[in-house]
């Protein structure tokens, strides 16, 4: 399964793996809505992602904005491939949308 949720305290973890594209968008959106409703901090693990679609980056950006509004902290880590795509698409210039390699 390319999208997984682990409910931990004090934050939740969403792990993405493999090729992440539009086909995963609905599932990821549902998990992000569930996370937002729970009011927890969120960790995004994209270290095992080989390729990511702009649609997924847009969902993650929207989650980051929602987290900032509600005071929830979102941290993430990503593979070098994902970081390259994040930079190429300009998402690394968005405040609060920070991933570490």
Image (spheres, rainbow, N blue to C red):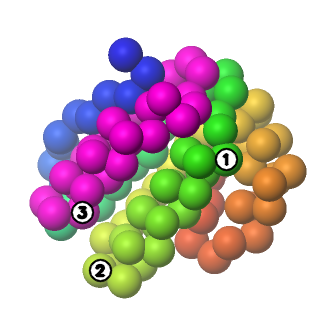
Residue name at image x 13 percent, y 60 percent: 38
Question: Is residue 19 positioned above or below 40 on the image?
Answer: above
Percent position (x, y) of residue 41? 29, 60
Query: What mark, if any, has residue 70 been given in the picture?
Result: 2
Q: Residues within 10 Å of mark 3 (few under 14, many from 20)?
A: some
Secondary structure under badge 1? helix
Residue labelled with disc 3: 36
Percent position (x, y) of residue 59? 49, 55
Which circle, 1 or 3, is nearer the viewer? Answer: 1
On the rendered image, what quadrant is the N terminus found in? top left
Query: What mark, if any, has residue 76 been given in the picture?
Result: none
Residue labelled with disc 1: 54
On the rendered image, what quadrant is the C terminus found in? top right
Cβ–Cβ under 8 Å for marks 2 and 3: yes
Q: Earlier in the sequence, mark 2 or mark 1?
A: 1
In magenta stretch: residue 32:
yes
Residue name at image x 37 percent, y 83 percent: 69
Question: Is residue 38 positioned above or below 95 on the image?
Answer: above
What range of the chain is rendered magenta? 11-38
Question: Is residue 25 positioned above or below 75 on the image?
Answer: above
Percent position (x, y) of residue 100? 64, 48
* Left or right: 90 as drawn, with respect to 53: right
Residue name at image x 33 percent, y 36 percent: 27
Where, by quadrant of the figure, is residue 82 drawn? top right
Secondary structure under badge 2? helix
- In this view, the residue in front, 101 or 51, is 51
* Left or right: 10 as drawn, with respect to 25: left
Which circle, 2 or 1, is nearer the viewer? Answer: 1
């Amino acid at each position: 399964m390319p999208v997984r949720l682990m409910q931990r305290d004090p934050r939740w973890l969403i792990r993405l793996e493999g090729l992440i594209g539009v086909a995963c968008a609905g599932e990821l959106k549902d998990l992000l809505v569930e996370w937002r409703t729970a009011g927890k901090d969120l960790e995004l693990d994209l270290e095992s992602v080989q390729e990511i679609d702009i649609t997924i980056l847009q969902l993650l950006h929207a989650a980051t904005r929602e987290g900032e509004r509600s005071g929830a902290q979102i941290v993430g880590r990503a593979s070098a491939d994902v970081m390259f795509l994040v930079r190429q698409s300009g998402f690394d210039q968005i405040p609060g949308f920070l991933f570490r390699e």
